[in-house]
Image (tube, grey):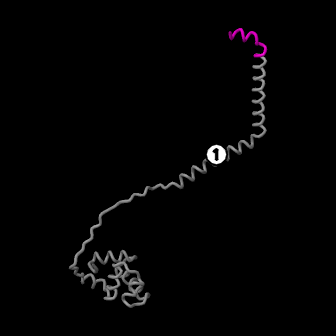
Amino acid sequence: MFRAFFLKHKLVILYGCALALLLFVMRWLEIRLLIMSHAQDIYFGAIALIFTALGIWVALKIATPKKEVVVVEKTVYVKHTNDFIRNEEALASLNLSPRETEVLELLATGLSNAEIAGKLFLSLNTVKTHTSKLYEKLEVKRRTQAVEKARQMGIIA
């Protein structure tokens, strides 16, 4: 059946295939000539796409954090002793005045300089002077270090 159909319409099928082949060759040549005439634009576009993709990749690599945040929970044991005995030898070796000791105790409670000044009826500058002298005598740089060192030495509870 197919053979009979092919033999009957042989000329039409051959002309159709020849036209399709001719159309394919013409389109191929058109695209080829189009590419040749706009080759510089195509190269620039390809380079732009490559560098855009590279820029996005680098930005994503830079923006992502390299370190993972790990939260560690630890139990902190605090000694609560009601019978605190001040280490007078350490107090004498540091040559702390009674007022500096009071300021140190109030620092340990977490009060700010202004709050300490209000409690002791002193000026803010006087409290700052006392704290700077405390830092100097305890050989520390921050109030948390001063409180920790004083607790280790047994000067405050």
Image coordinates for residue 99, horizontal then vertical, percent: 33, 88
Image coordinates for residue 135, horizontal then vertical, percent: 38, 80
Please tell me whether residue 22 is drawn above or below residue 32 in the rendered image.
above
Decide which of 21, 85 is in the foreground and name it: 21
Image coordinates for residue 87, horizontal then vertical, percent: 24, 81
Residue 88 appears left or right of 142: left
Q: Is residue 4 magenta?
A: yes
Q: Quadrant of the N terminus?
A: top right
Helix, strand or loop at label 1? It is helix
Amino acid bearing label 1: Ile
Residue 88 figure quarter: bottom left
Point 23% across, 79% down: residue: 84
Q: Does the magenta stretch include residue 16?
A: no
Q: How many marks?
A: 1
User: Magenta region, mostly helix, strand or loop?
Assistant: helix
Please tell me whether residue 155 is drawn above or below residue 45 in the rendered image.
below
Point 78% across, 24% down: residue: 22
Report the residue that reaches farthest toward the left. Answer: 83
Point 47% across, 55% down: residue: 66
- Crowd around label 1: few <14 · some 14–19 · many ≥20 (10 Å): few
Residue 59 appears left or right of 73: right
Residue 1 appears left or right of 65: right
Which portion, as a residue range, is magenta? 1-13
- The residue that mark 1 highlights is 50
